[in-house]
Amino acid sequence: MKKFILLVAVISISVGAMSQKGKVTSALSLIDQGQLDKAKEAIDQALVDDKSANWPNTFYAKGRLAQASWESENPKFKAFYPDPLAEAYAAYEKSMELDPKGQMKKKIITSMTYSQLASDLYIQGSDQFEAKDFKNALKSFETQITISEGDIYVGSIDTGMYYNAGLAAINSGDPQTAIKYFQQCADMKYLGITPYYQIYESYLGMGDTIKAEATLMELPKLFPDDKTITLQLIDLYIKSGKNEDAQKYIKVAKEADPTNYTLYFASGIIYLNEEKYDDAIVELQKSIDINPEVFDTQYGIGAAHINKAAEMFKAANEIMDVKKYSDAVDQANAVYAKALPFMEKAHQLSPEDTYTMESLKELYYRMKKTDKYNEIKALLDAAPAR
């Protein structure tokens, strides 16, 4: 009788275990049929039952469910997990961890589960990036990278995933991580010189101008025919306040591309900031001669004339001789007059710019152009407050 009772107990335990495991097996079928709510109910029960909680197939099924919930168009199913793809990846990894015989690993490889998961993560990361959710986009791309670099991934490596991760990192305020991924792109010769420029920008974002400069200085050896390197060096030196170095490279760039108006503009603005107004006017005029339809250049040369005239007035106030003082004032007014056509052109190119209107108001007042003064004053009075 005791043996009979014991045998019944063993059978009972076995049937109980089979019952829970059967639910997991049926859950996989339910997932394939799209009945994700019923599948989730079965898997949730299996996860809390001692007989199936640590069964590898339970976590494999959970991974399938989480991935299917992300892929579903049904909002109810999508809400099963806060981050379904992360949940799926963790579940698949757990299923292999619980399976020392490697059956789960074989199943994931033969079913190409990780290939589809990596594809889903790419889509999710791209959507997050478009939505400017850069931190989560980085998380998605990094998980895609981890999967793709693993030994159970089946498929070709998408080199672009490193670049995507780099962009997400730099946009999420993590330049150090961005550098890591952009460097991988550079090492793989992906997108040519572009990753190097991203590394340069990342170093600038960290405030490390030394490494930013070192990155650029290596490029002429790697890309000897690329003219953009000089422009990047000019940009760096301007941002770093190294005006002499900037002007040196601007000169080099002009020799290679003498009709590039932006080079003369850059040189002129440097001189303007250094209060070398005559030099600024010369360079900005050359820029205008090549392209007269640029607001910043027109405004810049107008400002150079106005600032020069203001200095001349200041100097005139030191003159005691009445005749010499009057001549000096006339000369200053003549420089103010030279500013007018440039400021008027700037106003034409950007009618809403209040700084230009303020300058025109001053110029019209000095030149006693009453109608023009009243007209620009009315525009300023109607303009939104800055």
Image: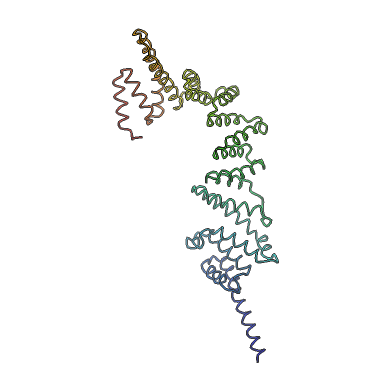
- As drawn, 274 above or below 38: above
Looking at the image, the residue that sits furthest to the right is 101
- As drawn, 1 above or below 365: below
Residue 163, how many percent across, how many down? Answer: 60, 44
- Which image quarter: residue 380? top left
- As drawn, 285 above or below 180: above
- Which image quarter: residue 43? bottom right
Quadrant of the image for the N terminus?
Answer: bottom right
319 left or right, relative to 279 = left
Residue 27, how many percent across, how many down? Answer: 57, 69
Residue at left offset 40%, top offset 23%: 343
- Which image quarter: residue 333? top left
Residue at left offset 31%, top offset 20%: 365
Question: How many marks can you see?
Answer: 0
Quadrant of the image for the C terminus?
Answer: top left
58 left or right, relative to 319 = right
- Image coloring type: rainbow
Residue at left offset 60%, top offset 39%: 199
**28 or 4, which lies in front?**
4
**321 or 278, which lies in front?**
321
Residue 207, how many percent across, how many down? Answer: 55, 38
Residue at left offset 60%, top offset 54%: 118
